[in-house]
Amino acid sequence: MKETMIETFSPEETHALGKKIGQQAKPGDVYTLIGDLGVGKTVFTQGIAEGLGIREPICSPTFTIVQVYEEGRMPFYHFDVYRIGDIEEMDEIGYEDYFYGNGLCMIEWANLIEEILPEKRHDISIEKDLEKGFDYRKITIRELD
Ligand code: ADP
Ligand code: MG
């Protein structure tokens, strides 16, 4: 397992990190994203989308589990499984086509569906540390396989 820690001090820096990941992403890459409300998950995800060449704004896919964006250099599958009641809901949407497909998957609240996550993935967490300032974020990326 490889672990990288990056510190950002503004939303722009977090957006830029996401954009870099979006630019470097390969088809089939899976990212999970964990972090408290207001920490910057949407800022980061918007950066990823931009890095893929998607111009439309990313909305939280709260009522759909997955939101698909086809506009970029590969499909972007943005999951938010926060409201999932049962893991069978993932079967119903055919999650394997996304997780093992040719796009980039980003899964928010992935801890709720841990048992079906691909072993090969990147886990990202974003955390605040108020002692280091209101706009400080610690972003940890773990590469699993
Ligand atoms: P989430 O999706 O995790 O609930 P959002 O991305 O919607 O959070 O909001 C994050 C908020 O925190 C935004 O208002 C953003 O401007 C602010 N912010 C301040 N500093 C940072 C930073 N370093 N990285 C990301 N967002 C930051
Ligand atoms: Mg959000």
Image (spheres, helix red, strand yellow):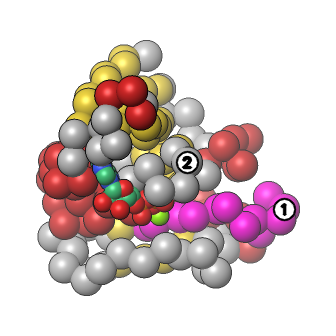
Q: Reply yes or no: does residue 109 show up in magenta.
A: no
Crowding at label 1, few (<14), some or many (≥20) Cα neighbours within 10 Å? Answer: few
Give the amino acid at mark 1.
Asp
Q: Is residue 88 magenta?
A: yes
The image shows residue 20 at horizontal and vertical percentages of 16, 47
Q: What amino acid type is highlighted by mark number 2? A: Asp
For image coordinates 61% across by 48% down, the residue present is: 110
| Disc 1 Cβ-to-ligand 2 distance below 8 Å | no
The residue located at (23%, 37%) in the rendering is 8
Q: Is residue 110 above or below residue 76?
A: above
Q: Position of residue 80 (x, y in %)?
A: 57, 64
Query: Of marks 1 and 2, which one's residue comes earlier in the chain?
Result: 2
Report if residue 21 is visible in the image. no
Residue that numbered label 2 is attached to: 36
Q: Quadrant of residue 73?
A: bottom left
Residue sitting at 67 percent across and 61 percent down?
A: 82
Q: Judge from the rendering whether residue 56 lies leftward or rightward of residue 1; answer left or right.
A: left
- Tag nearer the camera, 1 or 2: 2
Task: Answer whether residue 131 is visible to the viewer in this image.
Answer: yes
**Image position, residue 81 (x, y; %):** 65, 62
Asked if ligand 1 lies within 8 A of label 2, the reply is: yes
Q: CA distance from mark 1 to mark 2?
A: 22 Å
Q: What residue is pinned by disc 1?
A: 86
| Whether residue 58 is situated above or below residue 34 in the rendered picture | below
Q: How many marks?
A: 2
Identify the image quadrant of residue 6.
top left
Give the quarter of the image for residue 97: bottom right
